[in-house]
Amino acid sequence: MLLLSRSVFLQFVPPFLLTTGVLTFVLSMDTVFRLINLIVDRGVKLSSVSLMLLYRTPQFLSVTIPIATGLAVVLVVVRLSLDHELTALRASGYSYGQLGRIATGFGLLTTALGLLITLVLQPLGYRAFEDEKLRILKSHTAKTIKPQVWNYDFSGKVLFIEALGANDQLQGVFVSDHPMGKDGSVTVASSGSVDFLKEEQAIVLHLQEGAIHRYSPTGGYQTVTFDQFRYVFAPPKIVSNAESGHIWGVPTPELWQGNDRTSRVELLLRLTNPLAGLALAAGMVSLSIISPRRYRTGAYLRAFILVVVYYLTWVAATEMATYTDTSELVLGVPALAVLTFGILNLLRMDGLGPR
C-alpha cells in the first residue's frame, strides 16, 4: 500500500508544476507588458526590469499555487478513473478515503509552500519591488531634468531650468501647471534641488528665492514671494501603482504585533490564502471520480464550479472582514467549508458518512 500511495502522490507533481507555470505566466502578462514599456519608452535596463518581475513573482504564486493544486488533483484522479487504474486500486482494497488522504497530503505540502511565500517571500518581494521602482524613478528623473529643455514628463506640470550647477543644483527654475486653467499657477525660483519622498513616491523641488504667480478666485492676480518653498508633485508614471496599500510590504512579525484591524486582516489573509490549496485538493477528489464509460467533461465542469464558488465566498469574506465589523476569522470560512465538503463526500462514497 505504501508503494501505491507514493506512486499516486508523485503523479500529482508534474501537472502541478506545469499548471503553476502556465497560470503564473498568464497572471503576470499585464505586469510583463508594463515592464517591457520601461525598456522601450524609458530606456530602463533589462537587468532592472528582470529584477522587478522577479520581485513580483511571489504575489503571483500566492494566487496560482492553490488553484494549480486543485487542478493537479482533478487531472490525476480523472486519468486514474478513465484508465481503469482507480478500479484496480479499489480491487486491491484501496478506499476512496485513502486516495483522499494522499491528495490532502499533497495539498498540505503545497499549503506549506504557500505559507512560506505569503508570510516571508511576498513581503520581502514587495519591499524590494518598491525600492527598485524608487531607484529607477531617481535615475529616470535625473536623466529627464535637463537644462534648456521644456519637460512635460510630469503629470499636469511643465518644468524648465536654465542650468545645472554644482552638485546638480538647479538654476533658474520655472514650473507651471499644464494646461493652464483659471486657477493655474506659475512658480519661478533662482535655484533649487531635487529630492524624493520614498513612502509617497513623489518628487520634491526645494526652491529658493522665488515667487508664485496665480489668478485669484475673484479674478485678480496674485504674486507670493518666498525665500524657501517645497514643491511636491507626482513623478512620471514609471510603473503603474494601481495596487493599494504598502501594508503588503510590512513584515509578518510586525503584523502579528499590530493591534489595528488592518494589520489583523492582512495577517489572516496571509495565513488563510494558502489554505485554498489544501481545501481544493480535498474537495476535488470526490468530484473527479467518474466511471470509465463517461466523459471527463463533467468532472472538469464540477471542478471549475468548485473553484468559482470557493473564490466567490473568499471575496465575500474578504469584503466583510475589511469593510464591516465582522470578525476577521470569517476569512477562514471558505477553506473550512470546502475542506469539510470534500471529507464528507469521500466518507459517503466509502459508505461511512451521511447519505
Image: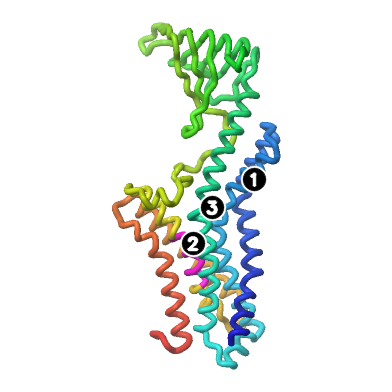
Q: Residue at x 59, y 85 (%)?
A: 2
Where is residue 342? Give x, y as percent.
46, 75
Quickly name the residue at label 2: 274
Quickly name the residue at label 1: 32
Point out the stretch of residues depicted in magenta. Answer: 272-281
Q: Residue at x 61, y 80 (%)?
A: 6
Where is residue 22? Give x, y as percent.
65, 59
Q: Residue at x 44, y 89 (%)?
A: 351
The crowd level at tag 2 (other Cα within 10 Å; few <14, some 14-19, many 20+) is many
Q: Regarding mark 3 in the picture, which secondary structure is present there? A: helix
Residue 121, numbered label? 3
The image quarter containing residue 301 is bottom right
The image quarter containing residue 11 is bottom right
Q: Nearer the viewer, mark 3 or mark 1?
A: 3
Height in image: 276 above or below 297? above
Closest to the observer, 181 or 313: 313
Where is residue 67? Give x, y as percent.
55, 63
The image quarter containing residue 73 is bottom right
Q: Nearer the viewer, mark 2 or mark 1?
A: 2
Where is residue 169? Give x, y as percent.
58, 15
Instruction: Residue type at mark 3: give it.
Output: Leu
Closest to the observer, 250 or 69: 250
Pointer 3 or 1: first along the chain: 1
